Amino acid sequence: MASMIKQDSWNDAKKTGSFSKNKDNPKARVIVKLSRIELAGIIDSIESNREFSVYHNSEKQTLQIKFCAYVDKVTQIQKGFSFSVNKQDKEDSTNKLGFVIGFSFPEARLLKNDLSVILNETFTWPKSKGEDKDEVEAPREQVERKSQGAPAQKNEPVQAGGNEDDGW
């Protein structure tokens, strides 16, 4: 999930912003549920510097989500990355809101790490009724053996031609 809130004030002396007045205002916030593929898209964007963008449609709103390089308009030097969400009401197309947050390179590195942890922790093997732990763990062991270059076991299918990369 990503939750973004519009800033409601700025203290120039302390160089701090406040968001508290908008935390419960639906016209000044957006909540986005990101899929595993979308999290992987953000990670890919950080690693490759490619833009990642996707749309979410619901009955009430359309969201355009984008993660991309942030390039300073004056110097034309990349300063990091930006994550933006543009929200448009389905019933009133003039009701539009834009949200953006910037990530420095170190912040993007932390984001990449945290998203990788989330992806790893949310992956679970499907477990049907009646299956015990040993039955569920067996496929994971086979995957680990394959990734370490171990020879295929008798119960593991081998693609014709012997090259597993040909059939992706």
Image (spheres, rainbow, N blue to C red):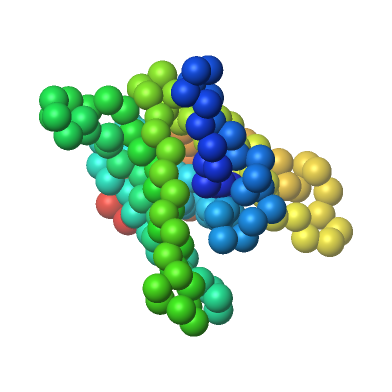
Q: Residue at x 81, y 54 (%)?
A: 131
Q: Position of residue 97 (x, y in %)?
A: 44, 59
In the current view of this chain or complex, which residue is farthest to the right? 130
In the current view of this chain or complex, which residue is farthest to the bottom? 91
Q: Position of residue 59 (x, y in %)?
A: 55, 79
Left or right, 143 with respect to 106, comes to: right
Quadrant placement of the C terminus: bottom left
Q: Position of residue 73 (x, y in %)?
A: 17, 34
Q: Residue at x 21, y 30 (%)?
A: 72
Within the image, what quadrant is residue 19 found in?
Answer: top right
For the residue pair 106 and 86, the one nearer the viewer reads as 86
Q: Residue at x 78, y 42 (%)?
A: 134
Q: Is residue 112 visible?
A: yes
Above or below 25: residue 136: above
Q: Position of residue 24 (x, y in %)?
A: 69, 53
Left or right, 88 with respect to 19, comes to: left
Q: How many marks?
A: 0
Q: Is residue 148 visible?
A: no
For the residue pair 130 and 104, the one nearer the viewer reads as 104
